[in-house]
Image (cartoon, rainbow, N blue to C red):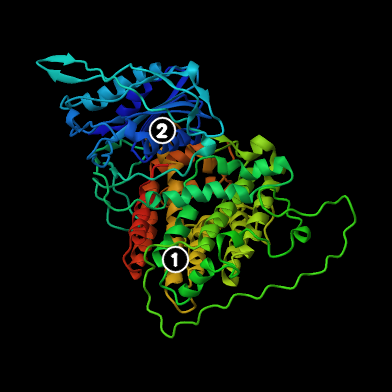
Amino acid sequence: MLVLSTLHKLLSQVLSLPDLHTAVLLTPEGQLVSCASDPSRCKDQIRVVVGLSGEVWQETGDQGIGMVDSELGRIIVLPVETPASSASEATSSGTEGEKPRVEPLMLVALNATNAVQWDELQSKVCPVLVSLLGVSRQTSYVRFLGKAVDKSSVAPNWQDPWSFGGHTNVTDGAVGIAGAKRGGKDEGRACAGVCPTMRRWSASASASTRYSRYTISSAVTRPSRKKYSALAARPATNASTSQSTPFATTVDHVSPADPRPSPYALLKPELNQLRERLLTLLGSAHPTLADIAKYYFLHPSKQMRPLLVLLFSRATNGLGQGWDMKKWAAECDGAGGRAEELDRPLTRPDVLNDYNPSMSDHTASFSSVFSLIPPSPPLPPPIPPPASASHIPTLASPAFLLPTQLRLAQIVEMIHVASLLHDDVIDSADLRRGVPSAPAAFGNKLAVLGGDFLLGRASAALSRLGDHEVVELIASVIANLVEGEILQLGKGASVSAETAESEKLVDARVGQERWNIYLKKTYLKTATLMAKGARAAVILGGSKEGEVWKEVAYAYGRNLGIAFQLVDDILDYDAAEATMGKPGGADLRLGLATGPALYAWEEHLEMGPLIARKFKHEGDVELARDLVRRSSGVERTRDLAKAHADKAKEILQLLPDSDAKVALEVLTEHVVKRTW
């Protein structure tokens, strides 16, 4: 059984500040287990390192090692082999009869500046591997590939961030180690060979951060406390399956690889293609505006919202009464549903003044006066096939995603990023996903304008989908995001600017009203885009009024979105201390009373005045964190998140069996169990 504090201490011994500043232990798909870093580094920077490390392992794990250059510096990723691994299993990739890759139990990743050489990073990580598997002295050996790359002869090809251009000179080298006890004596073994051309990683080319296929459970010792709300008054969670808290936490089990389809792996090609093509929608005649519009798209993202759109599209295409017509429109020239047609403006470009250099159409010049242009006669529309007399709901086979659904996935991500640009201005955020926030990089004014520009681009793309109900749904999301932000600020129609939402909570005392306010804000700011995006995807697949499919999508997205945000609120208290070993409290510093604080208030009435004044007085944040620590707020909030996730999973039973349905079920579990 590995205690997280021990892991943190072990990883801390590897650091060599200021150059080698971060060491993380993670699962193969990017879920954080433990971490040590320079105290000056924020948790967002560590999250990006974890995300990149998991992503790199997925791409280069067959080589046994990941070595990447990123905007955060050099990152090396090596596997912690399971005890079952043996030399006989270490077959070279590409040989005949190659077995499917068996993922290691965990990964170790180090992040350093470019001043640290690759061989030095390898030598630093070796003791970690030995210690991790040598604690019980039962592991046969640790094996890894350690190849030194002569960087002097490598010419980076910056046009392709995944590879080196030119000739790569590889020296056989540095080496493997063994921690085997043989005859009472440690015996070292070296593995030498030719390392394949190393891929260079760039955060600007990175794709989504994947969730882990492993379940990390933790044993938590807590005094029993009375449950004050009906939602939280549930049977106590079994110690072996409870989630981590800021207290003494252990990692006592890591499950074998889940045989069910991973949500991200199932749609990896589509998600990668979606992100690449999305940038073509964001061009502008003003270079700075184009840069800020693309800024957040060039960094790692969970892509949760487009993932939901694509999963529900795949899980329901063929079920709706209008599927045959939608599929015909996607294949018939002139029907408006083909991918090429979605890029064509509905109005002449010179009327739209849509200066997008990435688009095929350009506007007229302003060098002369504008003359009347006689309209061209419209082309006759194609004749649709006759509607079927009877429709039997049957999933499309093979699985088929419509171009309109792929475009919708891009649109919801554009709206999400626009909301991030605006949120970072409102919250005065310096960092986003481990890099300078857009306001920090471009200034508040350009960040606001960049968000507005994204909403404009998203609206134009939305109009070309050709479905009025979808336009109404997604347009309402934009209004919801604003309403949620106003609710969070606490400014109501009859309330002055100095009046906070938290005062309403104090007036409501310990009643249900405070939870209504909190959960309504959570829905408006987070869940609405997931719920309405998923519903819109099913409508684009032909679901008609009176059919249950789009209702399933909305109910699932609403419950999952609330669960997702509740876990985010937990991580502000939980992950920062238990996993990263450093203080959190970002929400409290913004004056926000989230689930853990509200539950703590039920158990400690002194939390009320802190909430009322939005934690503005000196020492308020520290006192509030201490009250949460001494309460069951974190566990009760996690119970609430699990209740919503379980409901989302239950709703899926109305759908026919498919790999997409299973992936949606897996996603509900990942959302609750995620640690960052």
Q: Is residue 188 visible?
A: yes
Q: Residue at x 12, y 18 (%)?
A: 182
Q: What is the three-letter code of the residue carrying label 2? A: Met
Q: Residue at x 46, y 74 (%)?
A: 324
Going from N to C along the chain, the mark reached first, 1 or 2, is 1
Question: In the rendered image of this protein, does residue 518 appear above or below residue 142?
Answer: below
Where is the C terminus found, in terms of image quarters? top left
Give the labeled residue for mark 1: 553
Front-most of residues 417 and 480 = 417
Give the label on residue 580, or none. Answer: 2
Please give left or right for residue 127 compared with residue 511 in the image: left
Residue found at the far top of this picture: 185
Front-most of residues 621 and 276 = 276
Question: In the rendered image of this protein, does residue 661 appear above or below residue 377?
Answer: above
* Secondary structure type for disc 2: loop
Where is the N terminus found, in terms of image quarters? top left
Q: How many marks?
A: 2
Front-most of residues 48 and 572 = 48
Q: Position of residue 10 (x, y in %)?
A: 32, 23
Question: Viewer-nearest of labels 1 and 2?
Answer: 1
